[in-house]
Image (cartoon, helix red, strand yellow):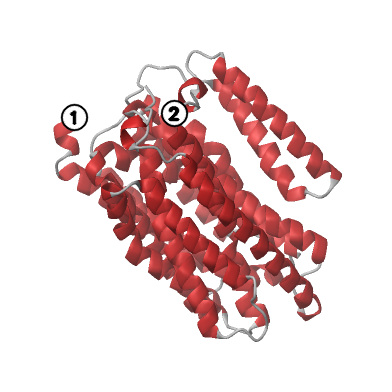
């Protein structure tokens, strides 16, 4: 792909088809969140296993993003992207045919693997075809498309669950993704593989996959002794991974280069913190609105759609701002707005007015809008083209790890306060305690995240780039 091509029509065609893909995946993800309170009783799932319906998709994303990004840099971003799409279609159809809660969780794992391949590489492709002065805008548009899916997901997911059953969410998502698959085959031309010819680090990838799986899974099992052991083993494994990468000729993560890049390091840290503080909000609010405030699934979805509507409207605006101004400062503003929103959610109770809830959700949406695409613009703009897949994969790993930690915090609190019981009127007080504690933790994380985002804030001419 030449520079002339990257400034022509191909970049808009690429953005359009990738945006459609993001829309379909996020539609399915958000629709399932609304269906969770219905799926639980259907399979007689306890609160902890029910949380794994969401978590089982986020853990594999964190595991696969970095190796998939490196594979894409070497063998072609479009090729690996299409493999991920095919796997997503198959696993989504399998979810629709699940006959038990555990089977559904297993198929969601494969959805997570494929979604990780698609999401991370899509960011790398968008970054590949757009020049730096338009990149923030393009990333913002792609993000807005994803949140159109999130916007439609809660409401349509509630309607589908109410009238056609929760399985219809997976049927429709698979059909839409199949259509997107053929659109990409038809419209997305060209290939991007700036690291072609380099070796893929199999041993490093294996150590990374095993270590981060143990680390993140163990986190969800804390405070149990096995959970603590898994976390310790996972941390030791990550240290071994770092040592291995320092002594590998063609590592999946070039630590010698990236550790000197303050923008790359601190922006990725801020990404993990942000999603740790934000991801579980929709999960908790879906349960709160339906169980505590008595909303129907479709009504709860209509309330939650506020977050996505705000993000759809403001993400392109924030992306364009990050093209004109220091992207880390724009992202820090987004983190600050998230802090205000999550602090408001700490005070939710049975009598909280709908307008209070909507105000908090609007602020939460603004926080995501002004954080996500500027943060991504900062990360991708700090590296060379041959590292785009790895950079997107690393950022995606941080995002997915944050999601995993977010649900892990909630699951730990559920385990302590509710145990294996379902969320019933008898356990509503325990649920409220868990929810408020989670929001307090998320508020603290947002406060820390503001400083993490600003820590890499150097003048543009001083930013070190990976070579």
Identify the residue shown where x is 75% and y is 77%: 428
The local crowd at label 1, few if under 14, some if 14 to 19, many if 20 or more residues have their Cα within 10 Å, is few
Left or right of 89, for residue 322:
left
Residue 225 placement (x, y as % from top left) = 85, 44
Q: Is residue 157 visible?
A: no
**Which quadrant would residue 311 be assigned to in this image?**
bottom left
> Which callout, 1 or 2, points at the residue further toward the start of the chain?
1
Depth order, front residue of 400/196: 400
Residue 202 placement (x, y as % from top left) = 55, 21
- Residue at the outermost right position: 225
Residue of label 2: 71
Q: Which mark is residue 331?
A: none
**Which quadrant would residue 176 be assigned to in this image?**
bottom left
Depth order, front residue of 430/85: 430
Left or right of 302, for residue 134:
left
Residue 299 placement (x, y as % from top left) = 52, 81
Depth order, front residue of 277/458: 458
Label 1, label 2: how far apart the Cα atoms are: 21 Å
The local crowd at label 2, few if under 14, some if 14 to 19, many if 20 or more residues have their Cα within 10 Å, is many
Identify the residue shown where x is 50% and y is 71%: 361
Q: Quadrant of the N terminus?
A: top left
Residue of label 1: 2
Check if mark 1's residue and mark 2's residue have beta carbons within 8 Å.
no
Q: In the rendered image of this protein, does residue 92 appear above or below residue 439?
A: above
Residue 21 placement (x, y as % from top left) = 36, 52
Q: In the rendered image of this protein, does residue 413 appear above or below residue 191?
A: below
Q: In the rendered image of this protein, does residue 202 appear above or below residue 302?
A: above
Identify the residue shown where x is 75% and y is 56%: 412
Left or right of 269, for residue 225:
right
């Amino acid at each position: 792909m030449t520079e002339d091509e990257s400034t022509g029509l191909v970049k808009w065609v690429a953005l359009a088809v990738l945006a459609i893909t993001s829309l379909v995946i996020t539609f399915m993800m958000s629709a399932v969140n609304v269906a969770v309170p219905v799926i639980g009783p259907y399979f007689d799932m306890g609160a902890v296993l029910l949380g794994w319906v969401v978590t089982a998709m986020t853990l594999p994303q964190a595991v696969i993003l970095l190796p998939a990004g490196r594979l894409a840099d070497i063998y072609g971003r479009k090729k690996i992207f299409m493999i991920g799409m095919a796997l997503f279609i198959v696993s989504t159809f399998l979810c629709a045919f699940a006959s038990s809660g555990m089977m559904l969780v297993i198929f969601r794992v494969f959805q997570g693997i494929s979604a990780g391949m698609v999401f991370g590489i899509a960011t790398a492709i968008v970054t590949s075809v757009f020049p730096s002065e338009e990149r923030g805008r393009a990333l913002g548009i792609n993000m807005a498309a994803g949140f159109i899916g999130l916007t439609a997901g809660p409401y349509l997911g509630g309607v589908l669950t109410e009238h056609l059953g929760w399985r219809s969410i997976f049927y429709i998502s698979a059909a839409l993704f199949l259509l997107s698959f053929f659109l990409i085959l038809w419209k997305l031309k060209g290939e991007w593989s700036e690291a072609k010819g380099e070796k893929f680090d199999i041993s490093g990838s294996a150590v990374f996959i095993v270590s981060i799986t143990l680390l993140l899974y163990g986190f969800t099992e804390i405070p149990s002794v096995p959970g603590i052991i898994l976390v310790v083993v996972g941390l030791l494994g990550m240290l071994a991974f770092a040592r291995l990468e320092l002594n590998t000729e063609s590592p999946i993560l070039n630590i010698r280069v990236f550790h000197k890049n303050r923008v790359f390091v601190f922006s990725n840290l801020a990404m993990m913190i942000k999603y740790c503080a934000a991801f579980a909000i929709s999960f908790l609010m879906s349960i709160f609105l339906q169980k505590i405030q008595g909303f129907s699934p479709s009504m709860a979805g209509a309330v939650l759609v506020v977050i996505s509507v705000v993000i759809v409207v403001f993400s392109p605006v924030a992306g364009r701002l990050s093209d004109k101004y220091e992207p880390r400062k724009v992202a820090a503003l987004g983190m600050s707005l998230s802090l205000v929103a999550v602090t408001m959610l700490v005070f939710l109770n049975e009598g909280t007015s709908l307008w209070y809830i909507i105000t908090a959700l609007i602020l939460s949406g603004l926080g995501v809008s002004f954080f996500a695409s500027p943060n991504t613009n900062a990360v991708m703009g700090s590296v060379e083209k041959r590292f785009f897949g790895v950079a997107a994969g690393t950022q995606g790993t941080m995002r997915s790890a944050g999601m995993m930690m977010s649900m892990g915090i909630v699951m730990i609190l559920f385990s302590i306060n509710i145990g294996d019981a379902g969320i019933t009127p008898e356990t509503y007080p325990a649920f409220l305690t868990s929810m408020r504690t989670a929001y307090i933790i998320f508020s603290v994380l947002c406060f820390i995240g503001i400083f993490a985002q600003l820590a890499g804030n150097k003048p543009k001419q001083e930013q070190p780039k990976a070579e």
